[in-house]
Image (tube, rainbow, N blue to C red):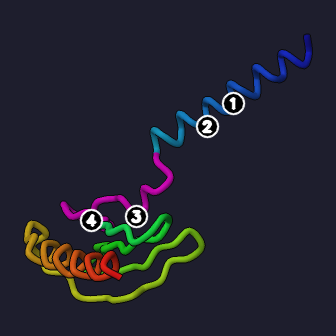
Amino acid sequence: MQAIGILLLLLAVLYGMLWFVKKIGMNKGFRGKKGSQVTLDVEERFHIAPKKQLVVVRFLNKRLLLGVTDHQINLLSETEAEDDSSDSSSTEEFKKVMGQFHDKDSDS
């Protein structure tokens, strides 16, 4: 009876921790708003292979191109981001370039 009570107490504590994390958020420092601007935003992902991808991330006023695998993350490029985040021309250009690389890779 004592073991069942301890198990129920442990489950209640775990449930409470889960509720707290969902309510407060673990990454609130990075996802918080600075004025009306989100400080961290994943703009685009391009999957190269299983567990390998290129990711364009906007952080503050920088646009970062990251190479992401299951073991590491590498910064490939860093540029200044425009103030207007609704401009999708750079995203479309990124998709076009990555599509060309993908087509070349599938031909060989």
Is mark 1 in CB contact (under 8 Å) with mark 2?
yes
Q: Residue at x 32, y 67 (%)?
A: 45
Q: Is residue 41 magenta?
A: yes
69 left or right, relative to 84: right
Query: Which residue corresponds to the image point at 40% horizontal and 64% vertical from the top-left?
Result: 30
User: In which quadrant is the N terminus drawn?
Assistant: top right
Disc 3 secondary structure class: helix
Instruction: Return the residue found at the far right.
Output: 2
Relative to 62, is 3 above or below? above
The Cα atoms of the two marked residues, 4 and 1, are separated by 33 Å
Q: Which residue is mark 3?
A: 30
Q: Is residue 19 above or below residue 94?
A: above
Dot 3 surroundings within 10 Å: few (below 14), some, or many (20 or more)? Answer: some
Nearer-N-terminus badge (2/3):
2
Cα distance in 3D space between marks 3 and 1: 27 Å
- Picture coordinates of residue 85, whole percent (x, y): 13, 69
**Do tag 4 and tag 1 residues touch (Cβ < 8 Å)?**
no
- Give the residue number, with chain letter if any, for mark 4: 34
Distance between the alpha carbons at the discs numbered 2 and 3: 21 Å
Three-letter code for the amino acid on which mark 1 is drawn: Val
Q: Residue at x 28, y 73 (%)?
A: 58
Q: Quadrant of residue 75?
A: bottom left
Q: Which one is earlier in the sequence, the residue at label 4 or at label 1?
A: 1
Inspect the image, locate mark 3, and give the three-letter code of the amino acid beneath it. Phe
| Residue found at x 76% / y 19% | 8
Instruction: Name the element at disc 1.
Output: helix
In the figure, is residue 50 to the left or right of 14?
Answer: left
Give the Cα distance between marks 2 and 4: 27 Å
